[in-house]
Image: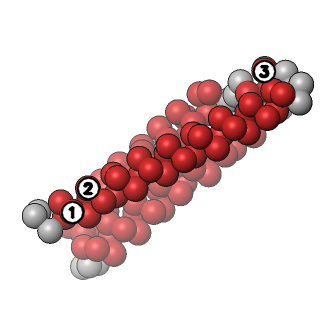
Amino acid sequence: MEEIGPAIILTVIFGFIFAIIYIGIRRKERMALLEKGVDASYFITKKANSATLKFGMLFVGVAVGILLGNILDVATRLQEEVAYFSMIFLFGGLGLIINYFIEKKEEK
């Protein structure tokens, strides 16, 4: 655990630096658009709950994948890593695919 500490600290530091730079650039772009006369309603996102649905379905898919990976690990002679990773990616991907079709249906 002591070896992971410096990596986590560096990740957090670089994450903060990236976030500050990204927010600064985004603010400048927005100010330039406002100066050109773009309406402020342009910046309001219409799909606020879309990200929530997407992450919710992803996490449910990952949880089901972990559960089925454990069942595969116990019930079959499949290696532990293969069982877990295959099921996590399979059901996480299925959750995102189902989310895509739900969003497509809501757009119509």
- Residue at (47, 38) in percent of width and height: 56
* Residue 28: % across, % down: 69, 38
Q: Which residue is mark 3?
A: 40
Task: Reply above or below: 48 against 97.
Answer: above
Q: Quadrant of the N terminus?
A: bottom left
Task: Tell me the amino acid under the disc marked 1.
Answer: Pro
- Residue at (54, 47) in percent of width and height: 21
**Residue sitting nearer the eye, 24 or 60:** 24
The reply, left or right, for residue 24 in relation to residue 29 is left
The reply, left or right, for residue 97 in relation to residue 108 is left
Element carrying mark 2: helix
* Residue 71: % across, % down: 26, 61
Residues at marks 1 and 2 touching, judged by CB atoms closer than 8 Å: yes
**Residue sitting nearer the eye, 26 or 65:** 26
**Residue sitting nearer the eye, 100 or 9:** 9
Q: Which residue is mark 1?
A: 6
Q: What's the distance in space between the residues labelled 1 and 2, CA to CA? A: 5 Å
Q: What's the distance in space between the residues labelled 1 and 3, CA to CA? A: 42 Å
Q: Residues within 10 Å of mark 1 (few under 14, many from 20)?
A: few
Task: Tell me the amino acid under the disc marked 2.
Answer: Ile
Element carrying mark 1: helix
Q: Which residue is mark 2?
A: 9
* Residue 19: % across, % down: 49, 45
- Residue at (30, 53) in percent of width and height: 67
